[in-house]
Image (cartoon, rainbow, N blue to C red):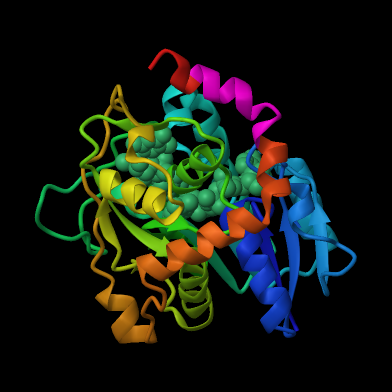
Amino acid sequence: MKTCLVTGGLGFIGTNFIKYIAAHRKDIAITNVDSVTYAANPCNIDEKSTPHYKFYKVDIANNDELGDVFRENKIDYVVNFAAESHVDRSILNPSLFVKTNIEGTLNLLKLSLEYKIEKFLQISTDEVYGSLGEDGLFTEITPLSPRSPYSASKASADMLVMSFFHTFGLPVLITRCSNNYGPYQFPEKLIPLTIINALTGKDIPLYGDGKNIRDWIYVADHIRGVLDVLEQGRFGEIYNIGGCGEMQNIDIISLILKKLNKPLSLIKYVKDRAGHDRRYAMDFSKITKELGFTPELNLNDGLDSTISWYLENEDWWKKIISGDYRNYYKTMYEMR
Ligand code: NAD
Ligand code: TDX
């Protein structure tokens, strides 16, 4: 059995990853390190009923506490999901993004080298490539051109990861994925925000002219891609993961409202995000050719499944929107 240190496993994608492993992979034990920020939900994973699972409430930016985790466990793989992940928050507080996304990743790299782990997988994002116009796709050799403090911190982390490969021979891998959606996504992100605001009769804030494009991928597809790269990827390589799900923001919001039988009049155009990237789109032919990965769920079916999850799990999101999230929402949207 291999032991995989997962960081950020109480967040959206980390939770889905751990649940998948627990259900399908008896040969992988999980040690989850999460500092439990606003984006984490400790109820997502029940320690008692999850086999071969251990949890540590540790900040990856705290090298001493993180060192204890490596000392106490024989780690084979590291998969680094932990991050400050919301672009709008990075505009309000860039320093926190440097601390977690860059310093935290550096601590993980140093400890991985010291403890001679077998594989280090960095979970990165298409945002490191910057912004596309109407044409073109990001490939793995597109120059890095991050435009928000969030994407700049992720690009910096990617460069540190590659530096540990070239300088120290650490067996690293990087995945860069497009916009995820699905169960357990925190309601600050566009799709859950739209579903929850629609269900609670609130306006849906649409930034700028609403024509920015994202490539949407269902989270379960991303996770299959991550596992493919972890198990079969070539060290020192970057793999794009995409969803074949390009859509303008106005269209995806309208589609969700239609599926929920809610009026389009809920859409409210608001001040644009500063430095708002226009379009993301992925060429992920490398992972398809090398590892056989393709996304399975199309956007329409993925949205149906996501909407059903939010309808069936009201308790999960109602607890969030009645807590600190209310202050965040006020700061972010009241004066917009
Ligand atoms: P999320 O914000 O939902 O979860 C992040 C998790 O990391 C939370 O549980 C949080 O408590 C934890 N965390 C934050 N700072 C920490 C620290 N200092 N130490 C330990 N834990 C810490 O994020 P997500 O959407 O699940 O994204 C996971 C990863 O995937 C991130 O690295 C993100 O950059 C990347 N990614 C996300 C998307 C997307 O669309 N959501 C797309 C591509 C890549
Ligand atoms: O209220 C909103 N109104 C709006 O128009 C919000 C929250 C977003 N938007 C727009 C901005 C983007 O064009 O919707 C699009 C998607 O926004 P987000 O959900 O905030 O995602 P994005 O900024 O594209 O970044 C996401 O994808 C890549 C994740 O948050 C990142 O962690 C990931 O790396």
* Residue 300 against residue 322 in the figure, above or below: below
Residue 237 in sight here? no
* Residue 131 against residue 297 in the figure, above or below: above
Viewer-nearest residue: 120 or 169: 120
Q: Residue at x 51, y 34 (%)?
A: 201
Q: Residue at x 69, y 52 (%)?
A: 10
48 displayed left or right of 112:
right
Q: Is residue 324 magenta?
A: yes
**Residue 259 location in percent, x, y?**
42, 56
Q: Residue at x 79, y 51 (%)?
A: 43
Q: Residue at x 51, y 25 (%)?
A: 95
198 displayed left or right of 131:
right
Viewer-nearest residue: 91 or 19: 19
Most common secondary structure along the magenta stretch: helix
Q: Is residue 70 magenta?
A: no
- The magenta stretch spans which residues? 321-331
Q: Residue 64 lies in what quarter of the image?
A: top right
**Residue 128 location in percent, x, y?**
32, 48
Viewer-nearest residue: 201 or 320: 201
* Residue 176 against residue 94 in the figure, above or below: below
